[in-house]
Image (spheres, rainbow, N blue to C red):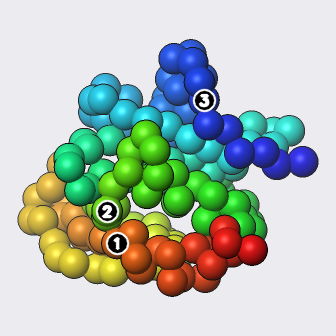
Amino acid sequence: MRRLVIPDNKEDVETITRWTADQLAEPKDSFGDHYSVCLEDEDGIVIAMVYHQRTENNVTVALAKRDGSIIAPSAIGDLLSIAFREPISAQRMTAFIKDSNQRSLDFTKKLGFTQEGRVRNFFKDGDAIILGLLKEEFEESRYGKQRRR
């Protein structure tokens, strides 16, 4: 049985953050002040999101998914919606994905994100594709509508 984990203690936040960082081959300290959530099953974390670099309207999201996992739209909606409600309350989410990571680009676009640009040499070994998702776009998406049912 899968369950949504919205941690209420530092230890659980760090466990999710460490797992996400390991999946993305990023140092976990690169997230700075952050908020982490995940979906887990009996084998551990299935998908995790680390919301970081918050500004008044935007939050950057780092997303990692266990290979081969299939995730119900309602669960994706639950995870994505967190960025748009308390305590984050962003009006948009931004993701930076390595241009050579086509699987992640395709998955993120499937979630409703729109490609907005490219940052050259963002990563040590390549460019970043910038993708964004506005709150109103999420609410009208398949995933946002799943949450309202």
Q: Read off the residue under disc 2.
A: 91
Residue 7 image position (x, y, % from top left): 60, 29
Labels 1 and 3 touching (C-beta < 8 A):
no
Mark 3 vs mark 2: which is more N-terminal? 3
Q: Is residue 121 left or right of residue 84?
A: left
The residue shown at (30%, 29%) is 33
The residue shown at (56%, 46%) is 48
The residue shown at (39%, 45%) is 88
Distance of label 1 from label 3 (alpha carbons): 25 Å
Residue 7 — which label? Answer: 3
Q: Read off the residue under disc 1.
A: 134
Q: Is residue 81 visible?
A: yes
What crowding class fits label 1: few (fewer than 14 Cα within 10 Å), some (14-19), or many (20 or more)?
Answer: some
Report the front residue among 73 and 8: 8
Q: Quadrant of the C terminus?
A: bottom right
Residue 105 image position (x, y, % from top left): 41, 73
Distance of label 3 from label 2 (alpha carbons): 22 Å
Labels 2 and 1 touching (C-beta < 8 A):
yes
Amino acid type for the residue under numbered disc 1: Leu
